[in-house]
Amino acid sequence: MGCRSITKRLPRYVQGLLPAADARSIADHMLTCSHCHAEMAQIKKVWAALGELPAPDGAATLFPRVLDRIESCKQKRVRRAWMSLLRPSFAGAAAAIMLICFVSGALMSSVYATGNPQEQAADDLAYSELLADGPQASFFDLYLQTSGQNNEENSL
């Protein structure tokens, strides 16, 4: 290993976090390289100085609060992810309902259609006679008459 890769791994080496093979190669390098040996001594001094610092007030209670906050954020994400799974099913349900309405409308129209053009024409004639007996005014005109707002500008 070169000095550059050794100095990157020195903090973990001082803490004892490296695998045994890496720790042996760093120890062997320290025997021959005074620069890396001096760097390791500096890191050990810094760790020792950090260990002597008093704990800040409230640090013991701050860490659990931070963890609780992280957990609550994770739970919110899980809920949101669950809701995003439902969105496509709503679109599918809407499409299915529209398809059912279309098919049922087509079936209903075929139930009322007689299939015989002569009978259909007779039915159409009877329907038109019923409409002919009704008022000639539109529903809007009838509304205007009953509400007292009938004048020539409002009629269709």
Image (spheres, rainbow, N blue to C red):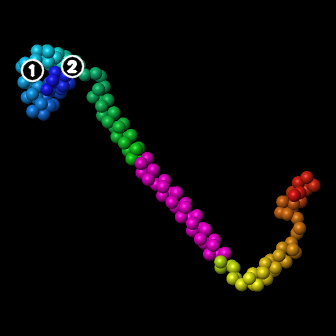
Q: Give the quarter of the image for residue 53.
A: top left
The one nearer the camera, 81 or 119, is: 119
Is 47 drawn above or below residue 83 in the view shown? above
- Kindly state the secondary structure of the residue where label 2 is placed: helix
Residue 10's image quarter? top left
Residue visible at 48% across and 53% down in the picture: 87
Between disc 1 and disc 2, the foreground one is: 1
Q: Residues within 10 Å of mark 1 (few under 14, many from 20)?
A: some
Q: For residue 50, which numbered disc appears in the image?
A: 2
Q: Quadrant of residue 110?
A: bottom right
| Residue 145 place in picture, x, y as percent | 89, 59
Image check: 123 left or right of 14? right
Q: Picture coordinates of residue 129 (x, y %)?
A: 85, 77
**Could you classify mark 2 by the number of other residues whose Cα lies within 10 Å: few (under 14), some (14-19), or many (20 or more)?**
few
Amino acid type, callout 1: Met
Magenta segment: 80-109
Q: Is 11 part of what is drawn in magenta?
A: no
Quarter holding the C terminus? Answer: bottom right
Label 1 secondary element: helix
Image-based side of 102 in relation to 64, left or right: right
Considering the whole magenta stretch, tell me its main secondary structure.
Answer: helix
Residue at the spot of label 1: 30
Kindly give the residue lying farthest to the front in the view shown: 2
